[in-house]
Amino acid sequence: MIFVTVGTHEQPFNRLIKYIDDVKKNNLIAEDFTIQTGYSTYIPQYCLWQKLYPYQAMIQNIQEAHIVITHGGPSSFLMALQMGKIPIVIPRQKQFGEHVNDHQLTFCRAVKERNGNIILVEDIAELADKIAQYDTLTASMPDDLKSNNASFNMEFKKLVDEMIRK
């Protein structure tokens, strides 16, 4: 199963929902899709969908998914990373009326550059190919989530240990 989430932002993300529905309609990808459509107005005809899922259902969908596709909201793709999944991320874009500006695009580019643990899709026409190549693309990617908190705590512990020894 491939799980798609567009988050809870109030602007529709019809471009992604319709694209996924067309992929399934045209049998471009054999796997089933489950979509969290949020406030999108496009109603999928070929995929299982629900506007919003309770938090526990979101966790279950992500855990059970072979692939997680998300919008560029950090909460959505970080949740996938926390569960060891490398997400395919399609940022909402202002030019399509999906957000008020392009901060998701800017942020996702930085995450990809810095961490290398998301598959960023800027041109939705490339999404079916990225899905088809997912296992190959992710084979050498880090699937862990680097935590600045863990690094800070380790350094802090070293300082405290030094102070106690003195």
Image (tube, rainbow, N blue to C red):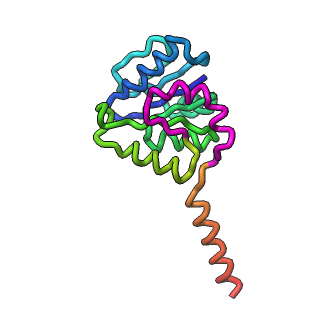
Q: Quadrant of residue 99?
A: top left
Closer to the camera in the image, 136 or 6: 136
Q: Residue furthest right?
A: 165
Left or right: residue 147 versus residue 120 is: right
Quadrant for the N terminus, please.
top right
Q: Position of residue 85 (x, y in %)?
A: 61, 38
Query: What number of labels is visible?
Result: 0
Residue 160 occupies which quadrant of the picture?
Answer: bottom right
Q: Residue at x 61, y 16 (%)?
A: 30
Q: Please report the residue visible at 46 percent of the width from the left and 15 percent of the height from the top.
A: 22
Which part of the image, by quadrant, shows the C terminus? bottom right
Residue located farthest toward the bottom when viewing the structure as drawn:
166
Rendered view: 163 above or below 123: below
Q: Position of residue 80 (x, y in %)?
A: 57, 39
Q: Residue at x 52, y 31 (%)?
A: 69
| Residue 88 as seen in the image, left or right of residue 154 | left
Q: Foreground: 87 or 121?
A: 121
| Stretch in magenta | 119-144
Residue drawn 50% across the image and 15% down it: 47
Residue 40 picture location, percent across and down: 36, 24
Q: Is residue 134 magenta?
A: yes
Q: Seen in the image, is 52 located left or right of residue 30? A: left
Asked if residue 139 lies in the magenta stretch, the reply is yes
Q: Position of residue 9 (x, y in %)?
A: 36, 35
